[in-house]
């Protein structure tokens, strides 16, 4: 029994350590009437809720423009795509413009295949907004 408990502690320690070193960061700032949310690293199920929380925080101030900077994203799965689609739906409902900045090629390809690029504006850099 002791060896089973020690093994379980070892597994827990592994997952705790993995969570502490995620390849992920999200931050936001406001610039006049626009809010900018910057996502870096792997945007997947493990971190989607953190992005949802950051978006909710900036949406409270009702910016006219919501910018999601994906230029530092290395991976985006379907949960990340869902977070962006939900933000787009809330933006339409609120009369807010939403723009994505320079998602990586694989993400742009997924947007094109899904038709999502027809409903959301994608730009190459913040200066072009």
Image (cartoon, grey):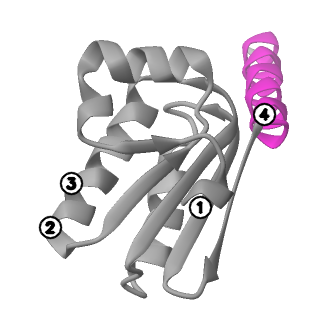
Q: Quadrant of residue 36?
A: bottom right
The residue under label 2 is 93
Q: Residue furthest front?
A: 128
**Mark 1 neighbour class, 10 Å CA radius: few under 14, some 14 to 19, many 20 or more:** many
On whether residue 4 falls in the magenta region, the answer is yes
- The CA span between labels 1 and 3 is 17 Å
- The CA span between labels 4 and 3 is 27 Å
Q: Which of the labelled discs sits on residue 89, or is there none?
A: 3
The numbered mark, 1 or 3, whose residue comes first in the sequence reads: 1
Asked if the residue at tag 2 contacts the one at tag 3, i.e. Cβ–Cβ closer than 8 Å, the answer is yes
Q: Residue at x 27, y 49 (%)?
A: 86
Pinpoint residue 110: horizontal percent, then vertical percent: 40, 17
- The CA span between labels 4 and 1 is 17 Å
Residue 17 visible (yes or no): yes
Is residue 106 placed above or below 126 in the rendered structure? above
- The CA span between labels 4 and 2 is 32 Å
Describe the element under mark 4 as helix, strand or loop. loop
* Side of 64 relative to 25 (left or right): left
Task: Please tell me whether the stretch drawn in magenta is mainly helix, strand or loop.
Answer: helix
Is residue 7 placed above or below 65 in the rendered structure? above
- The CA span between labels 1 and 2 is 19 Å
The numbered mark, 4 or 3, whose residue comes first in the sequence reads: 4
Q: Which of the labelled discs sits on residue 37, or is there none?
A: 1
The numbered mark, 4 or 1, whose residue comes first in the sequence reads: 4
The numbered mark, 1 or 2, whose residue comes first in the sequence reads: 1
* Quadrant holding the C terminus: bottom right
Pinpoint residue 60: horizontal percent, then vertical percent: 39, 83
Asked if the residue at tag 1 contacts the one at tag 4, i.e. Cβ–Cβ closer than 8 Å, the answer is no
The residue under label 4 is 23
Read off the magenta span. 2-23
Pinpoint residue 118: horizontal percent, then vertical percent: 25, 33
């Amino acid at each position: 029994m002791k060896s089973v408990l020690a093994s379980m502690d070892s597994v827990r320690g592994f997952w705790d350590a993995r969570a502490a070193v995620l390849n992920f960061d999200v931050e936001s700032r406001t610039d006049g009437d626009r809010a900018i949310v910057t996502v870096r690293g792997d945007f997947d199920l493990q971190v989607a809720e953190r992005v949802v929380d950051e978006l909710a925080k900036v949406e409270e101030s009702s910016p006219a423009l919501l910018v999601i900077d994906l230029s530092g994203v290395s991976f985006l799965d379907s949960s990340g795509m869902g977070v962006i689609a939900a933000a787009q739906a809330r933006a339409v409902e609120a009369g807010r413009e939403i723009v994505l900045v320079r998602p990586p090629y694989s993400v742009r390809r997924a947007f094109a295949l899904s038709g999502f690029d027809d409903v959301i504006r994608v730009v190459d850099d913040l200066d072009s907004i």
